[in-house]
Amino acid sequence: MPFPRLASIVLSIALASLIAAAGCAPGGSAGEALRRGTRITLTGSSTVAPLMSEIGKRFERRHPGVRVDVQTGGSSRGVADVRDGLAEIGMISRDLAADEADLHAFVIARDGVCVILHAENPVASLTNEQVAGIYTGRIDDWSDVGGPDAPVTVVNKAEGRSTLEVFTAYFAIDPREIRADIVIGDNEQGIKTIAGNRHAIGYVSIGAAEYGREHGVPIKLLPIDGVEASVRRVADGTFPLSRRLHLVTASPPRGLVQELIDFAQSLEVHDVVEELSFVPTP
């Protein structure tokens, strides 16, 4: 695996999700799990999940007997699960929508979204109009944007993923008009897909992409509006397509849930945030 630490984290989360699904008793609820004092369940964004998995491990060491169970599924799942009482905390990699004002949101880090290509693709940049043209099928060959004479493989995020929402909003793309060849879920899957296809284009978390590239994955991050796609540019506020990563709850948090959220926002985990190529909040 080209970037073993992040891949290991993602695999651990996936296994935890399967175990949790197999072990849920009918009629069980998030509230009942907390009353037993053994588990805090988080579901949602695949961008936030590796970060909260590592933060959760530190929290467990502080609270013997408490388990922090992190599951993915997209930001929409995180919102739905906290509303339905299936999770104490939802993870979303965007701001709350207008119809989510009933939820309580807590910022834990910042990230950006970038377009990625295979490292051997000679295209060094794309205009916003070219990106929109590629994703809506008006541009279907790399030769149309200065690349090789080869058809473009369009990789898109699945519905319910906040990365899809922020990408389409920024590039003014109607999601219904996207002509995708491949639909992927989490960032890891997107990065592996691009790394395995020299003619593919996709978009993922900058943190995940930069982490992968630094660990030998053959991808390149394209600039947006002339600004390099990097954690450094997200941190200094110059990268135009950035977002805040949140934890959300259905009601004001209390007890262990409040402690976990406070811990995730504290200086004590800034090293974890930076190690996974995100930007700590002040």
Image (cartoon, helix red, strand yellow):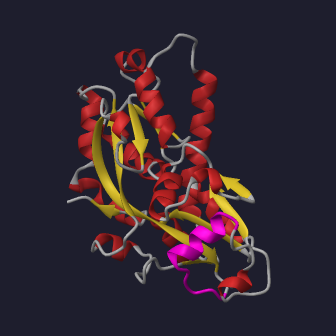
Quarter in which the N terminus is drawn: bottom right
Q: Which residues are magenta?
A: 122-137
Residue 38, placed above or below residue 260: above
Q: Is residue 117 left or right of residue 182?
A: left
Q: Residue at x 63, y 61 (%)?
A: 190
In the rendered structure, the answer to whether residue 229 lies left or right of residue 264 reads: right
- Residue 229 percent across, percent down from the top left: 44, 76
Q: Nearer the viewer, residue 112 or 8?
A: 112
Residue 79 versus residue 25 in the image, above or below: below
Q: Position of residue 221 (x, y in %)?
A: 53, 77
Which quarter of the figure has residue 241?
bottom left
Q: Position of residue 65 (x, y in %)?
A: 38, 28
Q: Position of residue 238 (x, y in %)?
A: 31, 75
Q: Nearer the viewer, residue 17 or 174?
A: 174
Q: Viewer-proximal residue, 171 or 154?
A: 171
Farthest top residue in view: 27
Which quadrant: the C terminus? bottom left
Residue 69 visible in the shown view? no
Q: Residue at x 52, y 79 (%)?
A: 127
Measuring 59% from the left and 63% from the top, which residue is drawn there? 4
Q: Quadrant of residue 66?
A: top left
Q: Residue furthest right?
A: 150
Residue 180 against residue 238 in the figure, above or below: above
Indicate left or right for 220 with 272 as reference: right
Query: Does the stretch in magenta take in 214?
Result: no
Q: Residue at x 25, y 33 (%)?
A: 258
Q: Is residue 231 among the parts visible in the rendering?
A: yes
Whether the magenta-drawn stretch holds residue 134 is answered as: yes
Q: Is residue 271 left or right of residue 181?
A: left
